[in-house]
Image (cartoon, rainbow, N blue to C red):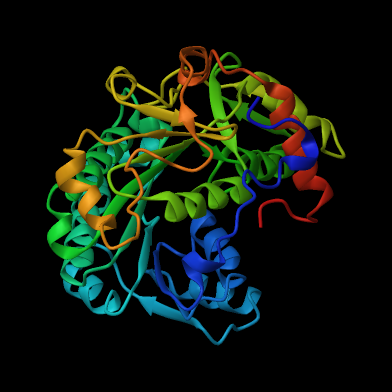
Amino acid sequence: MPWKKASKLVGLFTFNMSNDFKNKTILVTGGTGSIGSALVAKILTLDPKQIRILSRDESKQYHLFENLNYPSNLRLLIGDIRDQSRLEQVMQGVDIVIHTAALKHVPLCEYNFSEAIATNVIGSQNVIASALKNHVPKTIAISTDKAVYPTNVMGASKLLMEKMFTNANFYANNFNSRFACVRFGNILFSNGSVLPLWQKQAAREQNIHITSPDMTRFFISKDQAADLVLKAVHLVRGGEIFISKMPSINIGRLARHFAAHLPYPVKIMKIGFRHGEKKHEAILDDHDLSRPILEDEAMFIILPNLNLKKHIIPAYQHLDPPPHPLVYRGFKPARPANLKKHCGSETCYHSKLITDLINYEYQNSSSPNR
């Protein structure tokens, strides 16, 4: 099981991250978003030299700065990943880039496909080019389960972003840089996600809208998602895709559990699929399954289809002795049964883990949508 009991739901990993971030300068693109702000809060506890946030919304930057009690090593930088010259400027002297900035809403990306491409694809290419120019050692990009068998613009743009980041390692050795991706599902109580939307609908009209009660989705908490990214920073050697083993739930049951937490009755209304949506999601596709995959209790690592001797080993030759490129501490070759189980949201159904996680969020915050 990805999580054995509710008491472990708040975090996926136990590991010492101090050496990865201590006295380092970290840039988080989109650092005021749900996952970006969770990452900033966690990294601040790891004694970094400086954290730089690059985002477009000055109000969100100020509110985050205030919520974090004005840390002296946090820098707020207004800018857009579409602007490569600005990216090159803010990456000077950076040790780690965590790229979270993206357009993420499926229907809006369908209607505004050129904007989705400009941010998710061209903006991501700007991140890669700027990281290479500034010789940034580690750059991690945030992807989504919608990049697996994509049926919409957002998913397709994220799939292309994944390919760009993993393939950037073909020429990254000349710049002493490493690129990898993290892939996870829906983040509970994140901005714009279904639970905060239902909160607003219930308060406004005493009903909540669902597309289909049989639709299934993977879910993960903000803390778990942030831990997965930090683990990727710790493990990255170049070209990997790090994937959390997430449980899934059907939307009908999720809605009923959500409604049970409300102090008043609400009606659950079926409205049908939105443009670009699909019934089930997946975290692994046929191409992924053709590559070497490692696992531990909480995550998979899809290894790159690179010439390991040429592209990975040279980056570690300065170590004595250099580690074997396929050795990741605590990981073993993935079992076929585990891969099959976690491939699709309809086969990884475990609603109790998700409802326990929702209960935990409600019990530990007066406003889960924080």
In the figure, residue 247 lies in which quadrant? Answer: top right
Residue 287 position in % (x across, y down): 27, 21
Identify which residue, 178 or 350, lies in the foreground.
178
Relative vertical location of residue 317 with respect to residue 240 in this rendering, above or below: below
Viewport quadrant of the N terminus = top right
Residue 139 position in % (x across, y down): 32, 58
From the viewer's perspective, tell me whether residue 26 is left or right of residue 345: left
Identify which residue, 5 or 292, lies in the foreground.
292
In the figure, residue 214 lies in which quadrant? Answer: top right
Name of the residue lying farthest toward the right: 263
Relative vertical location of residue 138 with respect to residue 50 in this rendering, above or below: above
Identify which residue, 111 or 97, lies in the foreground.
97
From the viewer's perspective, tell me whether residue 258 is left or right of residue 316: right
From the viewer's perspective, tell me whether residue 252 is left or right of residue 239: right
Viewport quadrant of the C terminus = bottom right
The residue lying at 80 percent from left, 56 percent from top is: 366
Residue 305 position in % (x across, y down): 22, 33
Any part of residue 211 in sight:
no
Name of the residue lying farthest toward the bottom: 72
The residue lying at 63 percent from left, 75 percent from top is: 68
Residue 342 position in % (x across, y down): 51, 20
